[in-house]
C-alpha cells in the first residue's frame, strides 16, 4: 500500500520535475532548437521520414520543398543553386577543391575564418590571410588583396569573437574585385542578416546556429560562376575531390537528389523551419533580433565587470554576442546556469575571459530580458 503510494507519488512528480529542470540554451551553436522543431520531429517520425529511400519520390519532394522555402527565405536569385553538405566545415574544403587552383585570400576576424585559410594551405594552395586585431574586422579601406588570388573569403559574422563585417564592407570588396570568386560565411547570421546574394558567388551555413536545428547538415549556395570554375579545373585534368565535387552535387541536385545518403531528417526539418520563418516573416524576426541584441548589449555595458569585446558598435554581432569579463567567465555561466539559462564560454584562448550569448530567432525576448537582468546584477 505504502509502496504503491510512493510510486504513484514519484510518477506524479515526474512531469513537474522535468519541467523545473528544463534548461534553455543560449550557446552559440548548437543552441536552443527552433520552437517548432519538436512538433516537426514528431510528424517526421509518424511519416517515417528517417526510413524512406533517398532515391524515392518522397525524398525528391522533400528536397524540392526545402530548396524552395530556403530560396524564398534568403531571396536567392535564379542562377543560384542550393546544395546540402555535412556542415560548414565541409564547405570550406569543397570551396578550395572546386574553385581554387593556386591561390585564395582570407579576411580573418577570428578562429573560424582562420580555419578556412588553414584548410586552403593544407590542400597545397597559397593562402593569403589578412588578419584583423582580435575583436575587430579587417579594415577594407587599407586592405591589400593579391590580384592573382582566385577566391576572396569573408566571414560576415565571426562566432568566435562577435566581430561582424557590415554588408557595406562585403559590397565594397565585390565592387573592387569583380573577377574573384567571393565566398561569404553566413554560418551564424543567416537568415537574420539581409544579404543581397547576387553580391557574392558562394555562401554557406550550418543549421545548428540561427535555424535552431540539430547539427549535422550544411547548406552550400553557389552561382553558375562557381560551377564553371570547377568544371574548368575538372576539364583541365585536375582533381576537384570525389565525395562532394561541385559538378556531381549539381548533377544530382538537378534531380532533387544528393550523391550520398544524406541527412534526410535534417533536410526535412530545415524545410519546415524555413517555412515557419517565412510564415512568421523575416522582417519580424529581424526586428526582434535587433531589439534583443540591444537589450543584451545594454546590460553588458551597464555592468562594470563586463564590456562588449567588439569596440566598434557597427561591427558588433547581433546574433552571437561576445562580452569580455573581468572575472572568470565560469562564475557568470554558473550563475545563469542556476537559473536554467545556459550561455557559452569564450572561444579557444578566451574561454575564461569571455562569455558568448546566442541571440537566434528561437530565443524569446522574455528569456533575453531575464538574462539581461541577471547580467546587470552579477558582481565578482
Ligand atoms: C560554427 C561555425 C562554422 C563551422 O560550422 P560546423 O557546423 O561546425 O562545420 C563555420 N563558421 C562559423 C562562422 C561558425 O560559427
Image: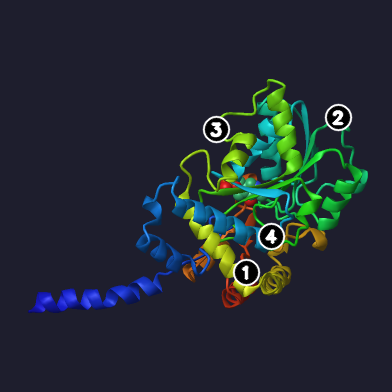
Camera-near label (1 vs 2) is 1
Dot 3 and dot 4 residues touching (CB under 8 Å): no
Instruction: Report which quarter residue 194 is drawn in.
Output: bottom right
The residue carrying mark 2 is: 148
Instruction: Please rate how many residues cluster around mark 1, counting C-alpha atoms within 10 Å: few if below 14, some from 14 to 19, many from 20.
Output: some
Instruction: Report which quarter residue 323 is drawn in.
Output: bottom right
Of residue 121 and residue 224, the one placed in the foreground of this image is: 224
The residue carrying mark 3 is: 243
Between the residue at mark 3 and the residue at mark 1, the CA separation in whole angstroms equals: 33 Å
| Mark 4, secondary structure of its residue | helix
Q: Residue 11: give x, y in percent of width and height.
A: 23, 74
Instruction: Report which quarter residue 314 is drawn in.
Output: bottom right
Dot 1 and dot 2 residues touching (CB under 8 Å): no
Say whether residue 330 is visible. no
| Mark 1, secondary structure of its residue | helix
**Mark before the other along the chain sequence, 3 or 4:** 4
Against 220, residue 240 (above or below) is above
Query: Any mark on residue 74, and which?
Result: 4
Say whether residue 69 is visible. yes
Dot 3 and dot 1 residues touching (CB under 8 Å): no
Amino acid at each position: 500500500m505504502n509502496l504503491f503510494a510512493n510510486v504513484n507519488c514519484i510518477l506524479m512528480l515526474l512531469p513537474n520535475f522535468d519541467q523545473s529542470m528544463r534548461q534553455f540554451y543560449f550557446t552559440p551553436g548548437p543552441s536552443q532548437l527552433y520552437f517548432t522543431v519538436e512538433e516537426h520531429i514528431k510528424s517526421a517520425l509518424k511519416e517515417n521520414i528517417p526510413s524512406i529511400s533517398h532515391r524515392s519520390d518522397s525524398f525528391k519532394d522533400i528536397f524540392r520543398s526545402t530548396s524552395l522555402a530556403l530560396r524564398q527565405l534568403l531571396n536567392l536569385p535564379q542562377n543560384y543553386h542550393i546544395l546540402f553538405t555535412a556542415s560548414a566545415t565541409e564547405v570550406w574544403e569543397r570551396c578550395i577543391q572546386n574553385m581554387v587552383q593556386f591561390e585564395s585570400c582570407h579576411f580573418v576576424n577570428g578562429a573560424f575564418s582562420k580555419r578556412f585559410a588553414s584548410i586552403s594551405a593544407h590542400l597545397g594552395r597559397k593562402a593569403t590571410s589578412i588578419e584583423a586585431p582580435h575583436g575587430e574586422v579587417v579594415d577594407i579601406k587599407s586592405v591589400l588583396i593579391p590580384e592573382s588570388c582566385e577566391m576572396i573569403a569573408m566571414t560576415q559574422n565571426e562566432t568566435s569573437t562577435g566581430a561582424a563585417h557590415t554588408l557595406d564592407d562585403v559590397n565594397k570588396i565585390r565592387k573592387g574585385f569583380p573577377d574573384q570568386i567571393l565566398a561569404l560565411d553566413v554560418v551564424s547570421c543567416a537568415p537574420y542578416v539581409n544579404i543581397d546574394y547576387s553580391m557574392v558567388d558562394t555562401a554557406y551555413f550550418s543549421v545548428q546556429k540561427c535555424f535552431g536545428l540539430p547539427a549535422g547538415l550544411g547548406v552550400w549556395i553557389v552561382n553558375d560562376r562557381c560551377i564553371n570554375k570547377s568544371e574548368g579545373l575538372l576539364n583541365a585534368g585536375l582533381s576537384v575531390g570525389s565525395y562532394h565535387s561541385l559538378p556531381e552535387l549539381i548533377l544530382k541536385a538537378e534531380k532533387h537528389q544528393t550523391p550520398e545518403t544524406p541527412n534526410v531528417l535534417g533536410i526535412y526539418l530545415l524545410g519546415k523551419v524555413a517555412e515557419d520563418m517565412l510564415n512568421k516573416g523575416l522582417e519580424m524576426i529581424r526586428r526582434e533580433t535587433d531589439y534583443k541584441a540591444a537589450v543584451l548589449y545594454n546590460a553588458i555595458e551597464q555592468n562594470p565587470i563586463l564590456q562588449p569585446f567588439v569596440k566598434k558598435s557597427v561591427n558588433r554581432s547581433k546574433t552571437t554576442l561576445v562580452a569580455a569579463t573581468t572575472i572568470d567567465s565560469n562564475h557568470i555561466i554558473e550563475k545563469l546556469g542556476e537559473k536554467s539559462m545556459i550561455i557559452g564560454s569564450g572561444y579557444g584562448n578566451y574561454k575564461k575571459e569571455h562569455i558568448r550569448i546566442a541571440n537566434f530567432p528561437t530565443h524569446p525576448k522574455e528569456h533575453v530580458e531575464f538574462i539581461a537582468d541577471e547580467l546587470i546584477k552579477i558582481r565578482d
